[in-house]
Image (spheres, rainbow, N blue to C red):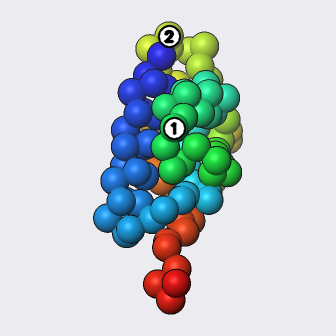
Amino acid sequence: MHELSMANSMVEAILDTAKKNDAIKINEAVFEIGELTMLNPEQLKFMIDILREGTILEDAEIVINMIPTKIECESCGFTGETKTDENRDHLMTVATCPECENTRVHILQGQECTIKTIKIEKEDENA
């Protein structure tokens, strides 16, 4: 259940950024979450929804884009997207080469956990 701590960090970072930019409202927050983070997007969204209650983030559209796993295989040289096998190791997701099934791969993409963008409103300076 590491979604709660990640959601808390993300909400705090968004609110801090909004405050530094004199925002009066946040309209949208876009996240990029890699498959290998083992973060469940539905649980993450649920936790964000709870944590943002009563804040300027409360009514924002929350967009979570899942980033597929991309690897480079040490054995056959394959480079591209792959599926992960969560059943292979109960502590972590394992990426395998779809060509030769080797697990000795370099992860090129899929470990992301970022706030990509936030859209804010500021007070009208001409008012």
Viewed as shown, does residue 21 lie left or right of 118?
left
Give the x, y percent position of residue 59. Answer: 64, 47
Crowd rating for badge 1 (residues with CA inside 10 Å; few <14, some 14–19, many 20+): few
Point 58% across, 43% down: residue = 58
Q: Residue type at mark 1? A: Gly
The disc labelled 2 sits on which kind of residue? Answer: His
Mark 2 or mark 1, which has the lower sequence index?
Answer: 1
Residue drawn 40% across and 51% down?
Answer: 15
Residue at disc 2, secondary structure: loop
Residue 25 at what x, y percent from top left?
54, 59
Give above or below for 48 relative to 12: above
From the top left corner, tell me how far across and down residue 10 is, in percent. 43, 43
**Which residue was labeled with disc 1?**
54
Give 116 or 97, whichever is nearer the viewer: 116
The residue pinned by badge 2 equals: 90
Question: Does residue 106 appear in this view?
Answer: no
Q: CA distance from mark 2 to mark 1?
A: 37 Å
- Residue 39's disc is none
Left or right: where does residue 75 sit relative to residue 43?
Answer: left
The image quadrant that residue 83 belongs to is top right
Element class at badge 1: loop
Quadrant position of residue 30:
bottom right
Up-down relation of residue 77 to residue 44 (above or below): below
